[in-house]
Structures are given as structure tokens and as C-alpha cells.
Image (spheres, rainbow, N blue to C red):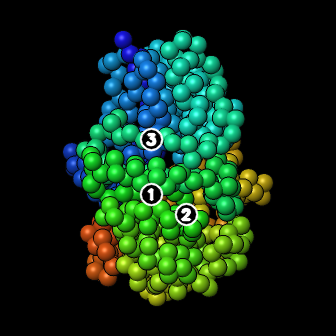
Amino acid sequence: MKLSVLLVFVPADSGVDGPSLLGETGRPGILGSLKDSLLKNVIKRAQFAIPPLSLMILSSIREEGVEQHICDLRFETLPLEREWDLIGISVQTGAVKPSFELAALLRRKGFRVVLGGPYVTIFSERCRAHGDTLVIGEADDVWREVLVDLKRGRLKPEYRASELPDLSVSRPVDKSALDPRNFFTTNVLQTTRGCPYSCDFCNVHVMNGHQLRHRSIPDVVAEVGRFLEKDRRIFFLLDDTVNADEEYAEKLFGELAPFGITWVGQATTKLGENRRLLDVFSASGCGALLVGIESLAEASNRAHGKFHNPARRQAENIRAIRSAGICVYGSFIYGLDEDTAEEAGAIEAFLDDTGIDVPGINLLRPIPGTGVFDRFADEGRLLHDRNDHDAFRFSWGQEMLYRPKRMPLDEFIPSYTALTRRVFSVRHALRRAAAAPTLKSAVLMFNLFYVHMYGLSRRDLARQMEELCETEGGRSR
């Protein structure tokens, strides 16, 4: 009889993986349940529900005598009616508390639990008490060792990747562990890993290193062909920057053009300066790119170690990308260290000037394990205890986690909520969809979804502002 391994994706409990208000308790009523069900379907259709690639990679590692399954708790209930020889939980930094709570429940029921993922890699000592086994680092090369030791009945308390995996080694990804009905698409892949940049609000370079590692182009091309046999929907490329190595990108996407796929990914706006690569992206089926604009104030970007994206070239580059028939999701971070109240008006003017198809205006989120988190903690600017990592969970711009440098909170929060109220409206959603160079229905759904989510954000921030005023008023009395 084969041993059974279950790999579990745990969603954040703060609204980002499903519609909810922070602080909601109890079971929703009938109308609330219907609303949640409808919005979860919107999330799926609005290109939010894609499978966890890390678990796809692990479940694709074949070891004789072991079968692996994936359970995505966004859409499935935990199948505890059957025996599992090992249950693995990928602990995301934004879902620490629910992950640990699940691990405790499973261990009480007698299951062996292995913990891995970004949080375990960065904060392994905090995780030891919560699992029987820890996997630290990128697990591509160590997961087979875990499965072999499971068969031998000799699981170790820790498995640690001694070096970053060589992505040029062929590791075919299989999708058989997924239920395709749960997802907007199952076509997710990664062609490179690592990031050459050092933005202090990001943990990618912390976990995956600064050196860009590449999969072989023949392996990626073969994977696209295999994936198309079972799912012809859109492809998501989960590279942090698909144009980081322009020579590699030009070769790869030139090879993908004959497949006739549509794909989306993340890039820097520098792409707009390379017309030849832009044409290759367009010919290969690129429908949309997320670009990290962050702040329109050069001093703000530099204050956080972002030097590769000069603000003065942003507008021209974005217009070039859109002129190539590619939609642009423009991601802003509101509240960087040199941002002032004038940033709100600059963002609105920039959106009008560039025609960005889907704007995302996020509050700066100091993530445990990043440079900005440690700096804010040392400066006394965090609003929560630096050791309470669950307080810094991922949320949809719904919580202030720190004190901005150039604006007091009672000025900053109204400035942000007024901005999102103006930017995210049904009128703007319809206008952006009509003007989108492609993927018009997806652009409409994204924008309408954001109308709802930023509405929740404003309600949460208003409540938090009241609580902060009461707390600080009490201290001053």
C-alpha cells in the first residue's frame, strides 16, 4: 500500500484570499453567505484563484510507494476522513496564525506535520514547536529526501537546503493533484527565480537570492505544451520580473509565440524602452503585466532601496507597453518614507496621463523579515509589537501597521481613503475596461472587484482610526 501525503495551502484570514471585513466574528447570515459565495466566484473569475505553484512543484516529485495530494483551503475542506502518513503545510508570512492553528489541530488528531514555506525559511526557530518536521529553504532538492525518509520511518526534525536549487536541472511540473474546477486557470509556471534588486519592503531577494536563476528554455516550452493538453486557459508566469534578463526573455517568448497562448506576468516599466522585446512579448500572447511603480516621488523610492525604476521615465514607458497591445496593472505603495499628502494628487494625474488599466494602491506593509520591518521597529514606528508577527499579516490595505514619516496618522488615513474613493468607482471601472487594449472583461472584473475591496478597506481603516484615537487619547489623559 502506498503512503499518502497531503500538501495544504492555508489562506490568509484577513480578507485578501476571500471577501471579509477584518474583525468579523461569528457565522454569516444567509445573505452574507450568498454574498461571500458570489464574491469568491468573482475572485476566481477575476484571475485571483490560481493554484499554489510551490505545492504543484512538490507534488510533482515522484517517489515510488508514495502518493501526493493537494488541498487548497480556499475552496476545499480538509479531507480528514482518510488516513494521511504526512501532512505538509506551506506557511506564508501573511498566514502564520491559521497555519499554526491548523498544525496544532492535526497533531492533536495524531497526524505527522511538516512545515515549510517562506515563513519557516526566514523564522525557523519560531516554527519548531509547531511541527514535527521543518523544511527550510527552497525545497526542490530536499523534498525527495523527506519522502524517502518517510518510507523508511525515519523522518528528521529538520531538512535544510544547503544551496539554492539549480533551475536548469529538469524538474517537470505535473498538475494531476489539482482540481481544475477550483481555479480561474491551472496554467501557472515560473521561468526564473531570484531578484537582482534590493527593495527594503520586499522579501524575494531575502528568500531566493539576488542572482537570477533560469530554467532551460526547452523545459519551459515543453511544459507549456503539456499544460495545454489539459487546460487551454490563460497562463500566469510567476517570475518576479519577466524582463530581468532581456536576452533570455527574448529567446523564451520567441519560442512560445507559435503556441497561441495568452499570458500575464510581472515586469519593470523598463520594458517600455526595449521595442524589440515589447514586440516579442506581444507576439507571444502577453495580455497584461503588473508593474511596480511604488511612488512617483523619486526620493521615496530611493529611501527604500528602489533605484532601478526612475519615476521620470515611468509614464512614457507605460504608454509604450500599452501601445504594444498589453494591459498594465500599475501597483503603487502609498506611504513610503518621503511621501507627502501631494502624492495622492500625483497618482490621480498619473493614472489619467498613462491610462493604466488596473491601478492598485496599497499601503506600505512592513513584512517581518524585510529591511523596512527591522528599520521601523528600531525607529519605534511599528503600531504592533515587533514580535507579534501575526499582527503584520497580509491584508487588502485594510490596516495601518506603522507610522508614516512625513504625515501624522490622522492626516494620512483620510488622505488614503479619499484617494481610493475617487480612484475606485464604477464609473472609472467602466471607463478603464472600455479603453483597455485587450482582456477587456478581465479589466472590468478586476476594477469592479477593487471597488468592493477598497470599500472594505475604508471601513476597516475608519474603525482603526477610532481605536487609535481612543487609545492615544487615553494615554494623554
Of the image marks 2 and 3, the number of the one nearer the N terminus = 3
Of the image marks 3 and 1, the number of the one nearer the N terminus = 3
Amino acid carrying label 3: it is Pro
For disc 3, the marked residue is 172
- In this orientation, which residue lies closer to the viewer: 71 or 209? 209
**Residue at the image position 36 percent from the left and 11 percent from the top:** 1
Instruction: Say left or right for 118 vs 125.
Output: left
Q: Is residue 51 above or below residue 161?
A: below
Look at the numbered disc 3 and give the secondary structure of its residue: loop
For disc 1, the marked residue is 237
**Residue at the image position 72 percent from the left and 55 percent from the top:** 371
**Residue at the image position 52 percent from the left and 86 percent from the top:** 316
Q: Are marks 2 and 3 in contact (CB under 8 Å)?
A: no
Q: Position of residue 391 (x, y in %)?
A: 58, 46
Q: Is residue 213 above or below residue 52?
A: below
Amino acid carrying label 1: it is Leu
For disc 2, the marked residue is 248
Q: Are marks 3 and 1 in contact (CB under 8 Å)?
A: no
Disc 2/disc 3 C-alpha distance (Å): 20 Å
Neighbour tally class for label 2: few under 14, some 14-19, many 20 plus, Cα within 10 Å:
some
Neighbour tally class for label 1: few under 14, some 14-19, many 20 plus, Cα within 10 Å:
some
